[in-house]
Amino acid sequence: MEVVCKQTREGVAQAAASRIAAVVASKPRAVLGLATGSSPSLIYAELASWVATGRLDMAEVSAFALSEYVGLPPGHPRSYAYEIGQVVTKALGLDPVHVHVPDGFAVNVENAAERYEQNLAAAGGIDTQLLGIGTNGHIGFNEPTSSLASRTRIKTLSPTTRSDNARFFTAPEEVPTHCITQGIGTILEARQLLLVAQGSSKSAAVAAAVEGPVSSMCPASALQLHPHATVIIDEAAAAELTLLDYYRHVYDNKPS
Ligand code: F6R
């Protein structure tokens, strides 16, 4: 996998946004997979500024959010549907008809997961999937021990994830207990994976994902199985990588 280390969070955002913009420039009807939470927020802001200044047109792009909490009603400000609506659909000028978020408020969440997979297949699969990583190594909300072949489904959030995400809610007990998330098998079908991580709280998970064994104990290690996976991280998130100098050498001497 390609590892790109930038000095700052802003550097991570610019590098990731540039790659997404390049995909959209070469394929205006690109299908993007979207992460939510704090990791991608500067990337979306960077893309939004390029759209606002006419440097990028995303009007024909389709998008699939990775996950959604179960039980939050439509329009709930902490739902990922709301977040994607604000920071992606509106800010990047996407057509809401082409933006898909798993339906965590469906009467039958299993059926909603199946519908999501059907929509994904009908769109032709994902060109570029943006990913964050949990402090426990999750991608999407595939918590440790998730099957590496899993599909979109309902999952129980781990205590670590609920505690990490409590910062987005007014009280820790308000964090939903379940979510609907793309599976690891679903994620691995994207044609390109782009994982971003910033800050020291992610350094152990990044090291396990990039340099550890492929294991369901670190779901992000499944990226090692993908032929086109890039990890873009800042210095703090890179701190526990033992081969960092080598990744820098490879990056600086990329064949043209
Ligand atoms: C949410 C998702 C999660 C987050 C991860 C990191 O859609 O995919 O895997 O990317 O929990 O969250 P932040 O970025 O808030 O640290």
Image (spheres, grey):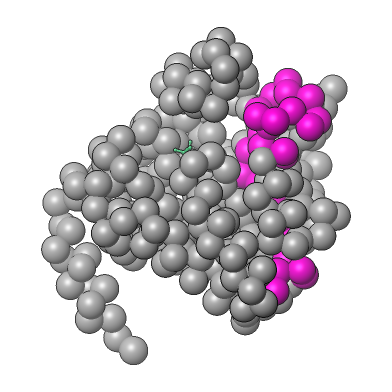
Image position, residue 222 (x, y; %): 42, 47
- At a point 16% along the width and 66% down the height, the residue shown is 246
Image position, residue 26 (x, y; %): 62, 81
- At a point 61% along the width and 51% down the height, the residue shown is 34
Name the one closer to the observer, 209 or 96: 96
Magenta-drawn stretch contains 22:
no
Name the one closer to the observer, 3 or 9: 9
In the image, residue 194 above or below residue 104:
below
Image position, residue 225 (x, y; %): 41, 55
First to last magenta residue range: 56-82
- At a point 74% along the width and 28% down the height, the residue shown is 76
Q: Quadrant of the C terminus?
A: bottom left
Q: Main secondary structure of the magenta part?
A: loop
Image position, residue 203 (x, y; %): 26, 41
* Residue 150 seen anywhere in this rendered image of the structure: yes
Task: Choose top left, top right, bottom left or bottom right for residue 182.
Answer: top right
- At a point 79% along the width and 25% down the height, the residue shown is 73
Q: Quadrant of the N terminus?
A: bottom left
